[in-house]
Amino acid sequence: MTSTPTTTRRSSAVRRAVSPAAPARAVPAEASRRSDRVFNVVALVVLIVLAILWLIPSLFALKTSLTENGTAALGAGQIISSFSPTLHSYASLLQAGDIWNWYIASGITSVLTTVLTVLFASMAAFALSRLMFRGRNVVFLLIVLGIMIPTQVLIVPIFQMLGAVNLLNTYWGVILPQVPAVIAVFIFKQFFDGIPKDLEEAARIDGASRWRVYWSVIMPLSRPVIAAVSILTFVGVWNNLLLPLFVVANPNLMTIPVGLATVQGSFGQRYSDIQAGAVLGALPLVVLYVIFQRQIVEGVTGSGLKG
Amino acid sequence: MTQAISVPPAGVAARSRGSNPVDRGGARAGWGFIAPFGLFYLLFLLGPVVVMLVASFFNSSTVQSGLGSFAGFGNYAEMFGRADFWDAMWHTVQFTIYTTPPLVILGFVLAVLTNRIRRGQWFFRLAFFLPFVLPSATISLIWLFIFTPGSGLWALGEQLIGLTPGPGVLAGPGTAMIGVALATIWWTLGFNFVLYLAGLQEIPRELYEAAAVDGASQWEQIRFITLPLLKRTTTLVILLQIIASLKIFDQVYLMTQGGPGTATQVALGLVTSTAFTDNRIGAASAASTVLFVLIVVIAVVRQLTDRTKEA
């Protein structure tokens, strides 16, 4: 495998060969090219070793989940060396039914939060990007400040407030506090700022309302950013443990993370069932990642750089 | 709408486009578009901050309604006087110290190495980034099992290199936090990895070519071009890492429940146990406020360094 720097090096060596100074420097160039080759090999080996190391925990969990509970209880050595894969743990988990409730709870809360966040954040971003109104700068400042608020640390007051309006133990109690994702407004605004204004001005002159401009001009042009924000929000809500852990006590309303948190205690020594639960909880996200790899990586990078 | 707008002189069009894209009735429309998000912002972002601040000055609890009696700075005084508060703060710092250097260094090294690969980059992105997308609950179940005393994968590894597996990483007060840190490093490395990859993509290729012409070796190119040009990314990564570490809760709750004893009890763990186990909302709010202020201070530092770097 040739990495890019090597090829550019070679071409620059060629360039050097035709320059007058070439003969004098030919020897050190040869020597350093050899050391570069060693460097490239070492780099690749280090990378591969670490990648394998990084894959081991997931693969081990997968292997365990495909092993009989009895074999899995004998220890890691037995799990690795046994070769009789079985879907028994998956079947028993899916038949027991709890996990379906968790899927439903996670699905409902993640989808509804995503829809509300995308709609409201994009509307706010549209106003900040396109509409002039008094107080716009104040709103923008509040949004900037909002980015710095660590929502996890607000779990106690959020619990109190939800309790005051009887939203504890409801899906809404899990959904509503997660809607104001300030970072989503930022990502949308940045994208909207880059859309040329000609199109919507034409639409405005034709008598389109601002809502129509937002809904029929801007939003259709924003599919990539809608996808990125949707996926990030969905993953974030799906994975959130803290909020549903304290807001929801009813087992029927438990989301995947909260449900999985009970697995360790209740499954005891049924190690392959436990790992099958871990895999099943992660499965929708693995599928999402495979489909939307680019959007997820770009979204995470973007929100990391901004937030 | 005036007809004149449809055929404006070039200069007027440019000016109106720059300052006032949409004019008549803009204020009402503006606030209308802001309102839904604004409402949620006030209710679930600013609102809780205010409620937390207020509650921290009262003897609120979950077992009685209302604020309870006024406590002044009593909750803060109590927290600052409690050994377990300082323990939790220390454990949070300890976790930060254990995780930040490996996460920053490994993230940098792996991004630099992966960036050099021409074909098959997707494999390394998958290997290093995928865990970051998974729920903390999955991560914790996997690592709890790896750390199973005596028969787990970790113990098997110890046997292979000739060590006698002890009672288990998570069972020892001195090693439990290391176990939590290891799981966290495995889980979140992907985040720093993709941030560094993005930073690397912004470095112009010509710089490396020019350095190569001058006879700089691969190592020298990394040392004198990549490293200095990624300084901004590194500052960002470190600050984000510290903020994330201060908020640590999931892994500890799921893997050790703060134990053995209170060896891995962290700040947010203390907040939630004070609020939901001891039912003392006031005291928990005071502890939350301290943690909140700490994190906001670092977030402000992060914003400021970003601004000055851009200028």
Image (spheres, rainbow, N blue to C red):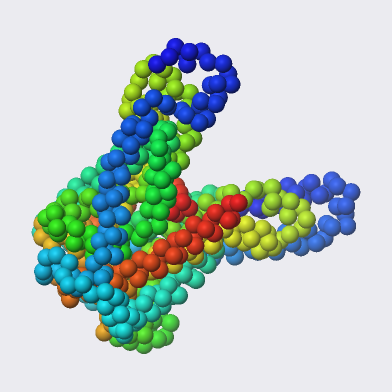
Q: Residue at x 59, y 60 (%)?
A: B231
Quadrant for residue B260, please give it.
Answer: bottom left
Please state if A206 lies on the left or on the right of B221 as rendered. left
Q: Nearer the viewer, residue A125 or B208?
A: A125
Q: Quadrant of the N terminus of chain B?
A: top left
- Count how many numbered circles sit on residues in the image: 0
The vertical placement of A113 against A91, above or below, is: above
Q: Nearer the viewer, residue B283 or B150?
A: B283
Q: Residue at x 89, y 49 (%)?
A: A20
Q: Residue at x 44, y 65 (%)?
A: B297
Q: Nearer the viewer, residue A220 or A287?
A: A220
Please state if B110 lies on the left or on the right of B24 as rendered. right
- Asked whether residue B198 is in view, the answer is yes
Point out residue B43 in the picture as x, y percentages from the top left corner.
25, 51
The vertical placement of A126 against A114, above or below, is: above
Point out residue B271 in the picture as x, y percentages from the top left corner.
27, 72
Point out residue B200 in the picture as x, y percentages from the top left corner.
57, 53
- Asked whether residue A56 is in view, the answer is no
